[in-house]
Image (cartoon, coloured by chain):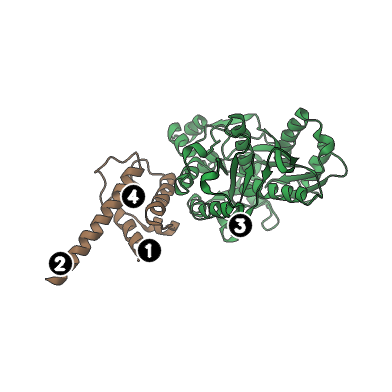
Amino acid sequence: MEPSITKIEYFLPRMVLTTDDLAQEFNKDSEVIFKNTGIRKRHIRNPKQIGSDLGYEAAKKLLTKYPEYISKIDFLIFCTEGLDYKAPTTASTIHYRLGLNEGCGCIDMPMGCSGFIYGLSVANAMIYSENVSCVLFIAADIPTSVIHSEDFDMRALFGDAGTATIIEKSNLGKIGKFIFGNDGSGAKNLLVERGSTRSPLDLEYLKQYENQTGNLAHGRMSMNGLEITRFSLEKVPILLNQTLAKNNIAFEDIDLFVFHQASLIILNLLKRKCKIPDSKFYIYLEEVGNTVSCTIPIALFHAEKENRLKKGDKVMLLGFGVGYSWGGTILHY
Amino acid sequence: MGWYNFTLLILVYLSMNIQELITYIEEEFDEIEKGTIHSESSIREIEGWSSMHALILIALVDNHYDILLTGEELKNAVTIKDLHEVILKRKS
């Protein structure tokens, strides 16, 4: 038996921003927005919901369906870029809300777009080393809380979500070896300014955004789409080849490629550059948008639901983005 | 005469390559009708030009010429000829 992903659930907030809504608000063509982004709907948190709430809801959904895990989980990883407090660890607060065992370790991981790969690698290593046996990995992000209402490109791309994944030893497959990478020189190209230790909020900042929901008190995201695209086109094909080589698997032997769902345009450019056939390239963007650390587990959930995955399949997962950071692995189903 | 022929050959070579770039652009963007753009056409005057087109253009150059243009290079290229010159410069 090897560590593997055995369960995935996710939760979306109720409020929806449709592409038609956006087209009307910005006086643009709805079909052109859809063609470029591949997105029809983005779920938006209510102002009182934060990342841990969405993650908690996803985990509650999973544990209601499979209550046997409440006593089995002995490690909780929470991945988000919107932690509750500077202290304590947000994972600890979720642990308490879920009523998990006292003998369960809790860590936070603020990783963003490559977060699912990094969290999965930690879960895999913890189980492989036999220090724990069952990891609940919650990823949840609320990018809409840091987007200015006039930033069309970002409002068109991002949505909020929470996911819960169980990683444990099973006969259902295994998790392969990982590749990681980072380049902090790209930090400025996808950045949430203010609201943190380096640049705390002040009255001037809050006054500037007094017409925005919550005065953008979580900070404001800025994105240089062109540089992010350059980074993706440069690094992802290399990451793909490194991940294949580290796992000693041929490109042709991968049954499904599940990348971080950045946007349809980036995914299609990468698909072409990496020469991946349509039949092996999974996209799940239309109903949820780019949900940051949640895109890969949501895509895996739907790929399985649509019978795109079967026992014995090899699935390449690649995460990349904010940081810059990137990571990849191969799941054996 | 020899120099004249050589220069002519170079000019023909460059214009052929510009034509190749124009063909790639025409193939990539549905909005462009074949034969309607030329070397002096402004990139940003392509119908419906948006930030998304800039991303596609970066990928197009990467795909066909194996060059990842910087944002600055793309910003400074006004016409297709300018873009072609950046490609030639990076290739040399």
Mark 2 residue type:
Asn
Name the chain under label 4: B
The label nearer to you, 3 versus 1, is 3
Label 4 sits on residue: B43
- Which chain is disc 3 placed on? A
Quarter of the image that includes the C terminus of chain A: top right
In the orientation shown, which residue stands out farthest toward the bottom?
B2
4 or 1: mark nearer the eye: 1
Secondary structure beneath dot 1 equals helix
Q: Which amino acid type corresponds to the residue marked 4 in the rendered image?
A: Ile
Looking at the image, tell me whether mark 1 or mark 2 is earlier in sequence order. Answer: 2
Q: Which residue is drawn at 45% across and 46% down?
A: A275
Task: Say which mark, if any, is on residue B90.
Answer: 1
Using the numbered discs, state the Cα–Cα distance from disc 3 to disc 1 in whole angstroms: 27 Å
Location of mark 2 (residue): B5
Give the distance between the C-alpha atoms of the residues marked 3 and 2, in whole angstroms.
52 Å
Of badges 1 and 2, the one in the foreground is 2
Q: How many labels does the image show?
A: 4
Q: Can residue B80 be seen in this view?
A: yes
A84 and A308: which one is in front?
A: A308
